Image (cartoon, rainbow, N blue to C red):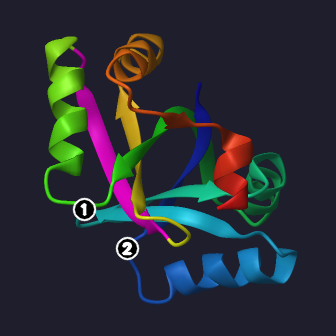
Amino acid sequence: MSVKQISVFLENKKGRLAELTEILEREGINMRALSLADTADFGVLRLIVDDVDRCVAVLRAAGYVAQVTEVIAIEVEDRPGGLHRILKVLGAAAINVEYLYAYVEQRKAAAVVICKVDDRGKAVSALQKAGIPSISADVLKSL
């Protein structure tokens, strides 16, 4: 089970992120999670949104470089050690975590970890065997 994430390359200039979020607001596209990492010249904005195809089209039409990547969304117990439990399972299955970011889910005592791994199928299988649920794109939209 995977979720589509959008990666957008942004110039490292004042106001570029605000310009992008203004476009999403105007188009009624809701961001569910995000991560921003930077270098000296550019940043990489990673987004989970409620309408991936429309978001990519809108951003590309506005001149942004936007790519779609398959990631997994994992439900994590919102308590000390919750993330470690997941990382232990992935490590035991020899799965490399390329990057991750997380947010706290508002309706229950859980967090959601968005995780890019080198083998999604193997990761989901290992997590399921350990009783750790992954979250579908449809469920993620409703959170």
Crowding around mark 1 (Cα neighbors within 10 Å: few <14, some 14 to 19, many 20+) is few
Task: Work out whether residue 15 or residue 126 is closer to the camera in this orientation and state it.
Answer: 126
> Which image quadrant for residue 20?
bottom right
Give the residue type at disc 1.
Thr
Residue 76 at x, y percent in the picture: 36, 48
Residue 125 at x, y percent in the picture: 43, 13
- Which residue is drawn at the image coordinates 29% and 42% (left, top)? 99
Mark 1 lies on a secondary structure that is loop
The residue where tag 2 is placed is 12
Range covered by the magenta-colored residues: 95-105
Residue 103 at x, y percent in the picture: 41, 64
Mark 2 lies on a secondary structure that is loop
The residue where tag 1 is placed is 39
Crowding around mark 2 (Cα neighbors within 10 Å: few <14, some 14 to 19, many 20+) is some
Q: Are marks 2 and 1 in contact (CB under 8 Å)?
A: yes
**21 shown above or below 43:** below
Report the disc number at residue 59. Answer: none
**24 shown above or below 125:** below
Relative to 7, 79 lies left or right: left
> Which image quadrant for residue 91?
top left
